[in-house]
């Protein structure tokens, strides 16, 4: 009853606005506590760049956004379809993930985000080996790449692969491409990453042409139907024997159970994740098996996250 009451309150604009303002301030405050100059990093990224021009270079003007993507989330009225979200996300990731390695969720570590992402690829490689999947990845897809943090981590695990990094936000992709150009200028070498404005459930890629599909911290942001469609799309584009890798929040973990038992903590979480209850009710293993993946393995990434790999049946 308490959670239904919270869900109802979030439909009331004054309550929603108050909750999201509190959530955003908490993110900025935590960043300051771990030594992240949240405002300074954002200001440095914002200044001196014509972001509208940058976005024109990556945006597909004909792309129709699904309804779920045009609603407020992550404490932004326009969700990820705004510059504020795109320019803040890298700094916010350091803040939000600072406590993830602590079972109690209290100890803040500036390297929490890097450890979270590193644990994903380390577990992915181990699970792929256990499942008998090939670790020789030539072509990979990163679904929901945002500004490219997840893609960079995948590159460290599969340095010889070519990557297609997809996201629905042209704002995020503009930042991703801008940062990529900076890295390429510093290194003097081009990166094997192509950023594409597309939905994870409609990649536009040919069938059975990909060795690895990765979906890192995306499914909890989606309604159940969209997640099912992404699973089906991953199965379509993967070659036989290819791997679908997922890193996500673990609703069964003790840390999340504490959140679910506290309506105030849940309200704070809900203010940034509108599809949270649909994710919690999703039977991910069953959906993967129904889509045709015949080997599914899971391991703990952090006290609150899991890594899962699903292998497409080899012919």
Image (tube, rainbow, N blue to C red):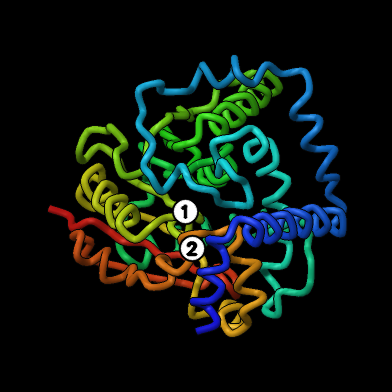
| Residue at the image point whose x is 54% and y is 36% from the top | 81
Give residue 139's quadrant in the image: top left
Q: Residues within 10 Å of mark 1 (few under 14, many from 20)?
A: some
Q: How many marks?
A: 2
Q: 285 left or right of 305?
A: left
Q: Which secondary structure lies at badge 1?
A: loop
Q: 309 left or right of 220?
A: left
Separation (CA) of disc 1 from disc 2:
7 Å
Of residue 261 and residue 16, the one placed in the foreground of this image is 16
Q: Which secondary structure lies at badge 2?
A: strand
Q: Residues within 10 Å of mark 2 (few under 14, many from 20)?
A: many
Measured from the top left, where is residue 193 in percent x and y?
A: 48, 30
Measured from the top left, where is residue 64 in percent x and y?
A: 35, 32
Residue topped by disc 1: 218
Measured from the top left, where is residue 37 in percent x and y?
A: 85, 45
Residue topped by disc 2: 248
CB under 8 Å between discs 1 and 2: yes
Q: Is residue 253 above or below residue 285?
A: below
Q: Is residue 279 above or below residue 138?
A: below
């Amino acid at each position: 009853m308490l959670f239904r009451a919270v869900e109802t309150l979030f439909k009331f604009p004054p309550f929603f606005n108050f909750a999201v303002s509190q959530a955003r301030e908490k993110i900025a405050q935590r960043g300051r506590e771990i030594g992240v100059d949240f405002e300074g990093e954002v200001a440095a990224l914002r200044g001196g760049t014509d972001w509208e021009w940058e976005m024109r270079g990556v945006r597909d003007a004909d792309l129709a956004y699904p309804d779920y993507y045009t609603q407020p989330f992550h404490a932004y009225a326009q969700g990820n379809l705004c510059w504020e979200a795109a320019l803040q996300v890298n700094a916010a990731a350091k803040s939000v993930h600072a406590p993830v390695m602590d079972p109690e969720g209290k100890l803040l570590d500036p390297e929490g985000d890097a450890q979270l992402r590193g644990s994903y690829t380390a577990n992915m490689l181990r699970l792929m080996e256990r499942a008998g999947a090939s670790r020789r990845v030539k072509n990979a897809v990163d679904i929901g790449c945002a500004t490219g943090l997840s893609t960079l981590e995948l590159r460290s695990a599969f340095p010889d692969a070519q990557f297609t990094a997809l996201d629905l936000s042209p704002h995020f992709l503009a930042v991703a491409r801008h940062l990529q150009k900076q890295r390429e200028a510093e290194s003097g070498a081009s990166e094997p990453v192509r950023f594409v404005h597309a939905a994870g459930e409609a990649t536009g890629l040919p069938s059975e042409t990909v060795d690895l599909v990765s979906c890192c911290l995306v499914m909890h942001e989606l309604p159940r139907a969209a997640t099912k469609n992404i699973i089906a799309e991953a199965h379509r584009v993967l070659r036989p024997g290819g791997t679908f890798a997922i890193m996500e929040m673990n609703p069964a973990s003790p840390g999340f159970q504490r959140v679910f038992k506290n309506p105030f903590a849940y309200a704070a979480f809900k203010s940034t994740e509108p599809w949270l209850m649909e994710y919690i009710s999703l039977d991910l293993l069953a959906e993967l098996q129904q889509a045709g993946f015949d080997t599914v393995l899971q391991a703990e990434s952090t006290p609150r996250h899991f890594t899962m790999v699903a292998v497409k049946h080899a012919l």
